Amino acid sequence: MAVAAPPSTAAAERLDRLERMWRSRPGLLGWLTTTDHKRIGLLYFWTTLVFFGAGGVEALVMRTQLAQPNERLVGPSTYDQLFSMHGITMIFLFIIPMTTGAFGNYLIPLMIGARDMAFPRVNALSYWIFVSSGIFMYVALFMGTAPNAGWFDYVPLASRQFDPGRNIDFYCLGIIFNSLASTLTAGLFIVTILKSRAPGMSLNRLPLFCFAMFAAAIGLLFALPALSVDTIFLFLDRNVGTHFFDVAHGGTALLWQNLFWFFGHPEVYILIVPAFGIATSIIPAFTQRKMVAFPLVAVAELLVVFIGFGVWAHHMFATGLPTVALVFFAGASALVVIPSTIQVFSWLMSFVTGSARFNTPLLFIAGFIFMFVTGGLTGIMFVAVPFDQQVTDTYFVIAHFHYIIFGAAVFPIFGGMYYWFPKITGRMYFERPGQISFWTIFVGTNLLFFPMHILGLLGMTRREYTYPAGLGWGPYNLAETIGAFLTTAGILLLFGNLVASYLRGEPAGADPWHGPTLEWTTTSPPPDYNYVVIPKVTSAYPNWDAADREEDRRKLRDGVLVLEQGHEQVEVTPADGWLSEIVEMPHSSPWPPLLALSLALVFTMLLIEKFEIAGIMGILCLLTLLGWHSTEPQEA
Amino acid sequence: MTAAPLPRRSSLPAAWWGMSILIASEGMLFGCLIATYFYLRFKNPAWPPDGIPAPRLVVPLVLTACLATTSAPMQLALAAVRAGRVATARLFLVAALVVQCGYFAYEVHDFHDQLGKVDITRDAYSSIYYTLLGADHGHVFLGILFNLWLLGKLARGLTRYRANATLAITWYWHFVNVLTIVVVGTLLSARA
Amino acid sequence: MTIRRLEFLQWAGLFAGAAAWAAAHVLGYGVTLAECNVAGSRWGISHDAWEGTLLAVAAALALLAGLAAVAVLVGTHTASYESDPPTGRIRFFAIAAAVANFLFFVVLLLDLAGTLSAAVCRQG
């Protein structure tokens, strides 16, 4: 909390101990061995931005190639790698790790009043695995053998017979490797949100951001195994000679599609649900009112992911499924619209009934709602099977999902960067360039993605490296390319603004927005231990409860829940948040990066088909795990 | 630790929830493998396809029953740990390990034997059969490693950490035992 | 109603309808795959009997779960979803369950109507 008056001697001593208990190790070694969720969040943030840049460059090359008919900037096989890597990068190496790894990691413990995640070393491990998997994938690109069968990599195109090189082996192994990171993060979020909350924060007082992260974590946990199984089957078919997907020996190519989309559809909800959480954090702050229909928004976030598990075959409406199957999946696809709509109405009502201040974060949220509704409308159109069968695999689909992904994931990410910039850096960003960056990006993305609807209806299919003249497609493509470069300019302005603000912005103080949640009660940036005392919580908007914040100051003086004797935090009962245990947390540790390195060696050996050495590397992993568990928490 | 003692309510520790996460993820993995088994079965006129013998009935059932019974000594080990009786806990753990290792050794030998008669690369049936069965054996092996580690830790005394570990690992074994019943049931359904 | 009864009804209401829809959805897809692929010709699956029973049972469960949620809402009418735990939390989840089960009930009825009236095993 922002301490107004100088604390008493007893309190000062406690603060001093707390400081020493939680101080980060200095230097590069400190960053390598960190288990602090804030540092891990920042590592994720910068790493995902590098991948965002790579994915963006891939997009710009494609857009330049397509600006005019019959261009030859890149040939077809390079183009195949570009669109595949663009999809893989943006989904697995940018959006998921940015929303969960960066925003989720940094903010969840702060919002629930904890000092760190429930398993801090697992958190570090997930980061080191993530960055290793990204490097693994990009080695493929630099070697010219990047995945080239699209981000969903259908068989039989991806089989050994039609794609004999290393490309798809990089895909299978890279995807499995990356999914380990996301699975660890997901599990960590679930346990932390259930067990590490401040006492008094029963689940009906959990911030909506945390509901959204919880929903996304459940989604990742149950969706990723399907992708792992699928890619294991493909790897076995390609390298061992099994016949999962081989029709001649009793297999079927549709097995790939069913498993892939059972993962793939929840994945796309997982892309946007954390962003919903960012929106539901920003809106109350800039309308200065509680979220309209709070319980309905919370359940809607969970329902979107849950029902989203039941719609996967709508990606297969053109594969000759039986009519009854179409009934189930069209029905579920229509159903899943409703929770999203509940949220949109709630957000809009919060705008209308609150006193909205359109600072940059809220502008991005307004843009997000516009883009999400547009993309959602085309999504509803796909529920009609006859329509879907006409436009599937055309630019109409590309338009739909880019409106959703760029609009409903990237816009909130940008808004969230501005919103939490003061908290993370301690400085205020420059407002005017912020607003200009929003409008530039907004106009740019609409110019980029709207014409794609028309092109799709005119018959331009996906993944074409060029197109002939005389079809009337040229002007639309040219407009899109201009939009792409305009969007890029806006994004560069956005980051330039943030860098300049970091160097020269005004000091922001603890609470520039009078935001609703706990992170605004502590200093900017937060201290290593987050909170001087584990905060008292009696509502879902703790920063607006002055009496509780006053109580926290008394707790510091009286030594209640300061937990300065060790590197400690609380465990609570999952549903109601009653205090259960005080537990000792691990501090910095070398085991997470060592384990990630061992795993990277396993996957590399599998890639180059040195299976015995891969086994030996596996034993190395087990030894590292032994080392990890050789230290135990100190007992009371 | 803290100055003022605050009222506490008992609750399953974070370690139990962490193991539940692993169980959920691996359970889902097996759900996908089993769904694949039936999906491929629907697409094949004969199952097992011609030339491949139907799986034996008695031996797999007996072995599965043996493995499933190890839930009892595991649970008894947990009860002993909760009562503070470490030596008793170690005994029950060793009893469970003997059966689990015996089971695993036989299964490895049998897996190798079966591969000699029908290779995994024969067709889709053999592909999913060995993958599903092999995955189950892999999870039994992981459980054995957990138990060996736990035995080593309990040999040096009892702490709350080690008690939580016993809880988590017992929970894992209940999962593996139920899983093996489901997997063997699935594979044996080919006889129907 | 006692807190224990309210607690039980709240969790049942929250999970039963959702589980029923999920199970019916996956099993319903499985039935149609089984009957419309090669193996189905050997097994003689009665489409209407299987799908009808599956979906009717699931719809009934979703309805019961919804009623459980409503019972909890009635039993906690003096509190709000912002009240102290456990009552506030119980009411919060009952609101969630009431809305969710209504949606599941409706979609299960639509599934029932659709599967019984659609041409069996025609390729879509």
Image: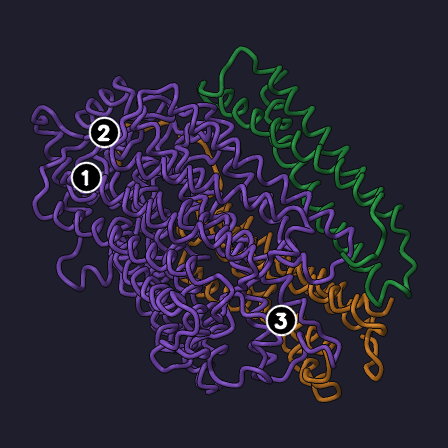
Q: How many marks?
A: 3
Q: Assess whether mark 2 and mark 1 are in contact (beta carbons under 8 angstroms).
A: yes
Tag 2 residue:
A513
From the rendered image, report the letter of the chain displayed in orange: B
Determine crowd level at label 2: few under 14, some 14-19, many 20+ residues with C-alpha closer than 10 A.
Answer: some
x, y percentage for residue A412? 35, 43
Closer to us: A335 or B178: A335
CA distance separating discs 1 and 2 = 9 Å
Between disc 1 and disc 2, whose residue precedes? 1
Quarter occupied by the N terminus of chain C: top right
In space, the residues marked 3 and 2 are separated at their CA atoms by 56 Å
Q: Is residue A375 visible?
A: yes
Q: Amino acid at mark 2?
A: Trp
Query: Mark 3 is on which residue type?
Result: His
Kindly identify which numbered label has been placed on residue A422.
Answer: 1
Kind of residue at disc 1: Pro
Mark 1 or mark 3: which is in front? Answer: 1
Q: Colour of chain C?
A: green
Q: Colour of chain A?
A: purple
Question: Quadrant of residue A620 in the image?
Answer: bottom left
Across and down, in percent, residue A466 comes to: 46, 71
Quadrant hosting residue A137: bottom left
Circle 1 — which element? helix
Q: Which residue is mark 3?
A: B137
Question: Where residue C51 sits: x, y (%)?
Answer: 83, 46
Pointers 1 and 3 in contact (CB under 8 A)? Answer: no
